[in-house]
Image (cartoon, grey):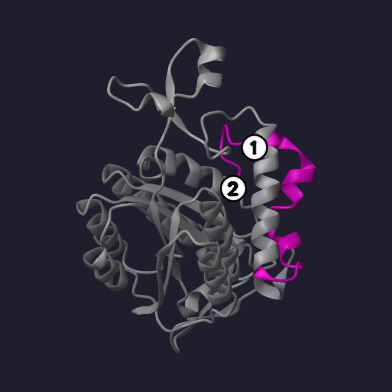
């Protein structure tokens, strides 16, 4: 999933390998994985050509007549000959809501656990959620975690306390696969109960009727909330590399289907591409950021996308 113009922070192998799912899968606790991802990502970002992302966490705005003169940063003035004031915390921070799909379909991993996709979609999604929570907490954003399948499974309210981050990491580490997928129902329930507007991050394989998913995500936008969607798919799901005739089983039901891959591959990939393009088009028109993620690829693209969306939301 190497998109044109896309590059990794710093474009260095040393940083990139710390974001590789195959490497992360061999580490210990989820907290260690999250810390490794975020520190490696930020280290690469500092040395990269990317600009405009908040990695220092001390932010400023231009002085406006009436502002408290004691808030002027005179060091910045000495360098720029312009007056800037440090932003108040309520101006810089967000309430960030991480929504993680734990339905049974998220348990898929490439056949034979090949190096292409060494983790399940749920494991990948959990590492991404943990890394985002770690990064959000470091930026002093209040973080919330909700897991869902056909209903809300677990919900932790937003908080910026370090102890709350540990609660989120523990919850993610204990997460198990749930029941059938019904993305839209939990989304509507969460949108109705959302208080302060902020940023919603949805991590899911989106294996539901696309229009219902889009309607559920648009509900957040109707409430004035910014949304970024990480569409997590296994490498095999994206490429359909199978060769021999095989029985394909529904992970969320009893249905099985015999198929010859060479016969159905073209139609499958065409249908997949149509679905992805539909999500891009429909969500884009609603002002929702959509990112397709391959579980065999590093997490840097997802973290960069989050920082970009957060910057606009702020």
Q: Is residue 22 magenta?
A: yes
The residue at which mark 2 appears reads as 1
The residue at which mark 1 appears reads as 45
Q: Which mark is residue 314?
A: none
Q: Earlier in the sequence, mark 1 or mark 2?
A: 2
Q: Dot 1: within a 10 Å radius of its alpha carbon, few (fewer than 14), some, or many (20 or more) residues?
A: many
Question: Magenta residues, as a range?
Answer: 1-30
Which of the pair 109/165 is nearer the observer?
165
Q: Residue placed farthest to the top in the image?
A: 81
Relative horizontal placement of residue 275, taking residue 169 as reference (left or right): left
Q: Is residue 27 magenta?
A: yes
Which of the pair 44/178 is nearer the observer?
44
Give the quarter of the figure containing the C terminus. Answer: top left
Q: Residue at x 54, y 82 (%)?
A: 176
Q: Residue 5: where, in percent of width, then height?
A: 57, 32
Dot in front, 1 or 2: 1
Question: Which quadrant of the view contains residue 28?
Answer: bottom right
Q: Residue at x 32, y 62 (%)?
A: 210
Residue 58: tell me if it is visible.
yes
72 versus 117 height, above or below: above
Q: Residue at x 25, y 55 (%)?
A: 218
207 versus 41 height, above or below: below
Relative horizontal placement of residue 289, taking residue 119 as reference (left or right): left
Q: Secondary structure at mark 1?
A: helix
Q: CA distance from mark 1 to mark 2?
A: 20 Å
Q: Residue 303: where, in percent of width, then height?
A: 55, 48
Question: Which quadrant of the view contains residue 44?
Answer: top right
């Amino acid at each position: 999933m190497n998109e044109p113009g896309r590059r990794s922070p710093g474009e260095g192998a040393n940083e990139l390998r710390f974001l590789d799912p195959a490497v992360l899968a061999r580490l210990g606790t989820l907290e260690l994985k999250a810390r490794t991802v975020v520190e490696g990502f930020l280290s690469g970002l500092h040395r990269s050509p990317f600009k405009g992302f908040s990695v220092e966490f001390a932010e400023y705005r231009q002085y406006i007549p009436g502002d408290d003169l004691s808030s002027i940063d005179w060091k910045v003035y000495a360098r720029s000959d312009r007056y800037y004031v440090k932003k108040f915390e309520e101006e810089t921070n967000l309430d960030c809501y991480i929504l993680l799909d734990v339905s049974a379909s998220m348990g898929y991993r490439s056949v034979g656990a090949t190096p292409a996709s060494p983790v399940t979609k749920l494991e990948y999604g959990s590492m991404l959620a943990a890394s985002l929570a770690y990064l959000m907490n470091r930026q002093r954003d209040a973080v919330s975690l909700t897991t869902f399948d056909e209903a809300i499974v677990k919900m932790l309210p937003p908080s910026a306390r370090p102890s709350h981050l540990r609660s989120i990491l523990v919850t993610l580490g204990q997460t198990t696969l749930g029941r059938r997928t019904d993305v839209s129902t939990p989304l509507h329930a969460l949108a109705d109960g959302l208080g302060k507007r902020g940023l919603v991050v949805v991590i899911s394989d989106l294996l539901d009727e696309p229009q219902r998913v889009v309607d559920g995500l648009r509900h957040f936008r109707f409430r004035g909330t910014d949304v970024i969607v990480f569409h997590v798919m296994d490498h095999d799901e994206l490429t359909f590399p199978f060769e021999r005739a095989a029985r394909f089983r529904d992970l969320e039901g009893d249905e099985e289907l015999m198929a010859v891959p060479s016969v159905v591959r073209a139609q499958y990939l065409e249908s997949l591409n149509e679905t992805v393009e539909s999500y891009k088009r429909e969500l884009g028109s609603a002002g929702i950021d959509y990112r397709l993620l391959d579980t065999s690829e590093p997490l840097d693209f997802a973290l960069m996308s989050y920082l970009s969306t957060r910057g606009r939301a702020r």
